Amino acid sequence: MPETEGAESSKTIARLAVRGGVWVMIGVYGNQFIGFVAMLVLTRQLSQEVFGTFALAAFWAGLLNIRTKLGLNYAAVRRGELDGRLLGTYFVLDVISGVLSLLLTALVIWWLTPQGDEGAATSGFDQQVAIALAVMMLTEFIPIFAGPANVIIERKMHLSAATLWSFASYLTAYICALILAFATQSLWSLLIINGVAFGIGVIGSRTIVRRDFPEAFRWRWRFDRTLAVGLLRDGIATGMAMALLGVITAQFDNFLVGTYVSRAELGYYDRAFRLAAWPNVLLTVAIARIAFLTMAKVKEDPERLAHTVRMSFWIITTFGVPLALTLSFAASDVVTVLYGERWMPSALFLRLLALASIGTAFLSIAFWLAAALGRHRVTIGLAVSQALLLVTVGTILTLTRGALGTAFAVCINAFLGATIGCIYTFRETKLSPREVLLFPLLATGIAVGAFYAVANLPQWTTMGDSLPEAIARIVATALMMGVVYLGVLLTFNRREMLVRIAFLRASWR
């Protein structure tokens, strides 16, 4: 029999959210750790041109992927009834969109590649980019076979086993990438990662569902035209908004640098961008996934909805902000220690992009709140405003200031987007901007002031550039940003810190 999800108690939803959040964070941190270690080795092993080619192909892959623009998974998660009709309709639509994506990619490659040297110069396309793009799009077809299983897992918020499978899949994928990198030092070292991870992920998702929810395979899966229209109508707004944020807002800068500056410069920029994304990957990605699922469950209850949003703000301001500040103010030493002197041009980009990651984190809360509430005009509006601003300002600054201008445009875009997102979030949830942002802003100012006070001391200014001294500066910067920042929050907002921690502990139990 199909399942109809009824009303759930506050304690049940809180427990699912907290436990799910912890498991998602474990998975994200685990994958990030092994990816971090693997990418350190890959960065030292591969050239800037290889990373630049990969980043440019990734932009085109995101642009041409129709599946991600339909938002079918978000629509399926928001549906009230989970049955064979939903899973069958979802799967058929996913397959059709995947086939259309491959056909569109083949057409674009045929259209751009034959133009030779002139086409490569004007579009950023060449044979290497075309091959990378084709492989990426073929790889993106693999997750289709796990789509219905993933819908069930997310609807049930049954994320612990999925987390373990995800960790195992990426661990295997990075091992394969490292072996290939040492053997060939080629672009294939990067292209193989998602293929292996997605393949193992399909096996994992279907295994979890067969073990924990076997009734799903006994349902009669069928395609329903009316439901298909409903899924598309409900999902396209979120999917298109995500595409604008994920492709234009998050990757159009790669297109600008790779096309109008150089592929090698894009390699430097891309490595800085990946480091700057740590606050987003470690916090925003995990929080957004759980927050969306939780907000979709409590969307009819304003009090619980506001509490969910408030917790999201608290986690990002408490843990994400000091991490982003550390990456920005220790950028040169971070690049030296992790990537080596060869990658020092990445440091200036990292200083700016790490600050931009803070704005992106705040914008994500507004976006997922609007998606959970079904406010399609808001999700589209947020995404379109971000995309238009980056395309206009980013193009102008890239043409006049090069890759550094691109980084400045990303910062401008992120903070304007955060401002608009916070205005919407506070208005929708009736939260007080003063309660949410005053103390984090105060803590940021004091932490930055403390850093500059210490950085001007003779003991700091006379330190050399050796590896031990660079590590010492990173540790000192992290301590100043972390200890001072959290110390200010505990001093001026102690009650909220203790209440939030107690709530997490109680929900977990």
Image: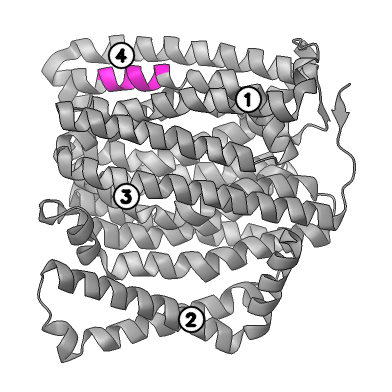
User: Going from the N terminus, do you reach mark 3 or mark 1 first?
Assistant: 1
Residue on which disc 4 sits: 109
Left or right of 498, for residue 391? left
Residue on which disc 3 sits: 273
Which dot, 2 or 1, sits closer to the camera? 1
What kind of residue is marked 4?
Ile
What kind of residue is marked 3?
Phe
What kind of residue is marked 2?
Ala
Q: Tag 4's secondary structure? A: helix
| Mark 4 vs mark 2, CA separation in Å | 50 Å
Q: Quadrant of residue 165?
A: top right
User: Going from the N terminus, do you reach mark 4 or mark 3 first?
Assistant: 4
Which dot, 1 or 4, sits closer to the camera? 1
| Mark 4 vs mark 3, CA separation in Å | 27 Å
Q: Quadrant of residue 60?
A: top left
Residue on which disc 2 sits: 443
| Mark 2 vs mark 1, CA separation in Å | 46 Å
Residue at coordinates 21% horizontally, 87% vertically from top-left? 456
| Label 1–label 4 contact, CB within 8 A | no
Q: Position of residue 7 (x, y in %)?
A: 89, 45
**In which quadrant will I find the C terminus?**
bottom right
| Mark 3 vs mark 1, CA separation in Å | 35 Å
| Label 4–label 3 contact, CB within 8 A | no
Q: Tag 1's secondary structure? A: helix
User: Which region is colored magenta?
Assistant: 130-138
User: Going from the N terminus, do you reach mark 4 or mark 2 first?
Assistant: 4
Q: Position of residue 126 (x, y in %)?
A: 19, 20
Q: Tag 2's secondary structure? A: helix
Residue on which disc 1 sits: 207
| Label 2–label 3 contact, CB within 8 A | no
